[in-house]
Image (cartoon, rainbow, N blue to C red):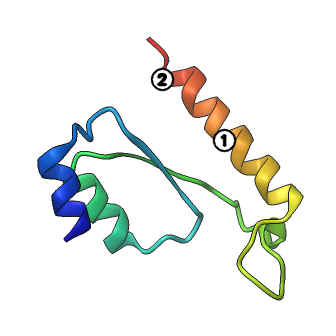
Amino acid sequence: MLLEYIKLNYNTKNTLLVLKPHTKRSVVDLLKSLDFNILLLSDKGDDNWSFDYDHHWTYYGRERAASQVASYIKSNMK
């Protein structure tokens, strides 16, 4: 319901959602169908992005995510 509300009331074509690696494909497809721009981060098989005891990113994971977001922005600036 929330996503449908957003689609009806906001312009989502200029919105970038950054998703964690291994986000379910069904979630990615749903967000794309609502005209969100999606950046699905890649961990390239590196297991050091999150702590073993919870889902929060490590410093390394935050650094890798920031690098990918910066690259995306640089390559998509007009």
Give whichever of 51, 2 is nearer the camera.
2
Q: Name the residue under label 2.
A: 76
Q: Residue furthest left?
A: 8
What x and y, as percent, mark residue 64?
77, 49
CA distance separating discs 1 and 2 = 12 Å
Give the side of residue 36 with respect to residue 45, left or right.
left
State the quadrant of the C terminus: top left
Residue under the image location 72 percent in, 68 percent down? 45
Q: What residue type is labelled 2?
A: Asn
66 displayed left or right of 15 = right
Disc tally is 2
Residue closest to the eye, 33 or 14: 14
Name the residue type under label 1: Gln
In the image, taking residue 58 as reference, residue 21 lies left or right, namely left
Image position, residue 33 (x, y; %): 20, 55
Q: How crowded is mark 1: few (under 14 residues within 10 Å), some or many (20 or more)?
A: some
Q: Element under label 1?
A: helix
Q: Residue under circle 1?
A: 68
